[in-house]
Amino acid sequence: MLELKNLHAEVEGEGIEILKGVNLKVNKGEIHAIMGPNGSGKSTLAKVIAGHPEYEVTGGDIIYKGESILEMDPDERAHAGVFLAFQYPVEVPGVTNTTLLRESYNTIAASRGREELDPLEFDDYIREKLDLVEMNPDFLERSVNTGFSGGEKKRNEIFQMAVLQPTLSLLDETDSGLDIDALRIVSEGINKLHGEEDAVVLITHYQRLLNYIVPDYVHVMLGGRIVKSGGKELAFELEEKGYDWLESLAKVNGEAK
Amino acid sequence: MSETKALESMIGEEYKYGFTTDVEYEDFPKGINEDVVRLISEKKNEPEWMTEFRLKAYRAWTEMEEPSWFNATYEKPKFDTLQFYSAPKNKPKLNSLDEVDPNIRETYEKLGIPLDEQKMLAGVAVDAVFDSVSIFTTFKEKLAEAGVIFCSISEAVQDYPELVKKYMGSVVPVRDNFYAALNSAVFSDGSFCYVPKDTICPMELSTYFRINNMNSGQFERTLIIAEENSHVSYLEGCTAPMFDEHQLHAAVVELVALDNAEIKYSTIQNWYSGDEEGRGGIYNFVTKRGACRGKNSKISWTQLETGSAVTLKYPSVILQGDNSVGEFFSVAVTNKRQQADTGTKMIHIGKNTKSTIISKGISAGRSDNSYRGQVKISKKADNARNYSQCDSMLIGQTCGAHTFPYIESANPTGKIEHEATTSRVGEDQIFYLQQRGISEDDAISLIVNGFCKEVLKELPMEFAVEANKLLGIKLEGSVG
Ligand SMILES: Nc1ncnc2c1ncn2[C@@H]1O[C@H](COP(=O)(O)OP(=O)(O)O)[C@@H](O)[C@H]1O
Ligand SMILES: [Mg+2]
């Protein structure tokens, strides 16, 4: 599904390298968790995979469904099934959630040669998805993320994921801002959406999310690299020991490259 | 023809209205003096009082100076080489469509405004103004049944002189300003509409303005009168060919609403705006003003200004009648090297008068976009209220947005609220939408439409969808 090969990326035009050789392989049907302290490059990694123009890939490759996607625009990557639930979802005043989602859904459907839905069919379709994350239908007619609380924004991201049915979901700190009930509901939603044909990459720095969504693999990111990978036990180890014990590992790895 | 088609055609992709039509024009001297003014009046076979009106205006104009207080710089029009009147040769008094010059007819077909009633939008009557003259007005009979007069201003001068005499110049006096004075001297044609007492105009009225002649200015004059308890909705659309030279468009529009009457005036202005380097494009210097003369009357201006090289335009309302209401809803988009200085004036005179101003300015490219608005509450206007909201949106780093609100209140019971915001379409906003599968151009269009929503919903329904499209097209490729 996704393979990152020694991926290097820097801030466009500024020469600040943030990703310093990331290697990762995600197969379909799998859930991966990427953990790591603030500033280690987790969000940058997600945005680079999704094609954010702020970053330039200076080395390595991103292979998705067997092909390099480096040359693809962000919207083309979305058409191919890449979805990013943002750590900081953006407000779009005056554009309702429904308008955005219908436009998104139909554009993606068209790019895959699927039928577009007319407004009535679409309405039925999204109401079903609302239930999945227990979101109030009032949000459909509200402007995208505008005036939403932190938790509402996060829930809205997962609602969008439910509507768009991506094959690779990158969920960036979806848990932060959610209270304990919301966390449970949203996690259950994600579990229901995940199946044999898609993959999920969870970015988080708390172990608590992983009580609800059980990952197949856990990776630790530090200083723009994945310094350690393991099974779900690794998350508990991190919870216990913090990230410090890995710092030395990061240095050794860094010098070795 | 679908209902939205007409507007689609007014809008076009990458300026598809830039073509010219081959027509033979009547000979007419260039430049301006009293003889030229008399000649225009003579050509139009006008009564003495009309000639006098023009001459008075001309004399006033010669004593006035071209204004320069606005936020725009441009090369002044050369009045001595400009042609002030331009009429296609084959223009007898037209009684049937068959008499319209086939080339001109085709022009309107191409613009998506067929003059053939069978092919027209149901429910929309059109007056087609080509350069200086009104070519044809549709659905006249149907409107006449309801008692509504809709014809060219030239015809009105001949057929309804009392009405024209009474109202023309009563809202915009001949010496009002430089370009209004000039218009009053040389105006060639335009639309006239009279809605009698207790009448709701049965259809949407519209005028379609087309500038074709490269060397002529367009000076049209519109007069709309709504008698007691009447209602009318009117829409104008404008396009012009692409020339390297600038063309001058200096119109005057006057609206009069009597007791309980309502006039809704919408504009979709898509004159040619010039190229990337600022070559060519229309100078759009117009005076538009409405008088709410009667109590409980209402005048509403809605404008979508997307074209022209330079726009100076302040559709205003004089709120004379008690409880009268004035509204101004505006979207002004500038791109490339366009300059727009636009806004409104709300002059509160009657008691309990109320005005609302919603202005959305969008600047992209290397353009400059200014909102300039005046709210004035006079001494007698007890309990007057105004709410103004002026929002600017910037796309890219090389454009400018400015807001100049002027507030004057001579009555302590008045209430004025003003809000202003400036935002920038950010890379993050576009990326967010692109991540949801939407292309960059569509993302910008969506963001801009969201920004303008409150104004766009004021446009007549038939035109709203296409107005959205126009915005998208105007801003295509403006990022990155
Ligand atoms: N556009 C940018 N310009 C400058 N520095 C950036 C930019 N984007 C990210 N960074 C820096 O890169 C590092 C990684 O950021 P980020 O990927 O957001 O970390 P995380 O999500 O792991 O907390 C941080 O030090 C951050 O300040
Ligand atoms: Mg982050």
Image (cartoon, rainbow, N blue to C red):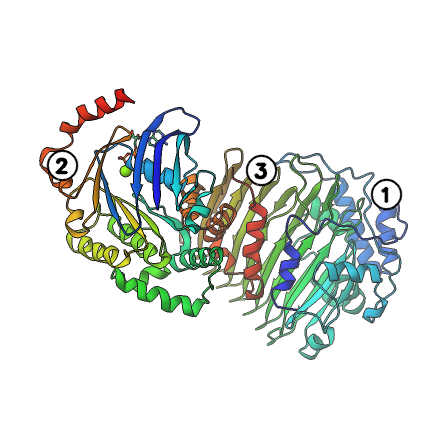
Measuring 44% from the left and 26% from the top, which residue is drawn there? A13
Q: Is residue B346 left or right of residue A88?
A: right
Which subunit holds the residue at mark 2? A
Decide which of tag 3 and tag 1 comes sooner along the chain: 1
Amino acid type, mark 1: Lys
Q: Disc 3 beta carbon < 8 A from ligand 1? A: no
Q: In the image, is residue B170 above or below residue A246?
A: below
Distance CA(mark 3)–CA(mark 1):
32 Å
Chain containing the residue with disc 1: B
Taking the spot 62% from the left edge, 40% from the top edge, the residue there is: B338
- Which chain does tag 3 point to? B
Q: CA distance from mark 2 to mark 3?
A: 54 Å
Task: Check residue B367 in the rendering and tell me which mark sits there, or answer none.
Answer: 3
Give the crowd class for mark 1: few <14, some 14-19, many >=20 residues within 10 Å.
Answer: some
- Which of these two is toward me, B241 or B195? B241
Where B410 falls versus B45 (above or below)? Answer: above
For the view shown, which residue lies furthest in the bottom direction? B145
Q: Residue furthest right?
A: B27
Residue highlighted by disc 1: B30
Q: Look at the numbered disc 2 and give the secondary structure of its residue.
A: helix
Vertical placement of residue B121 versus B414, above or below: below
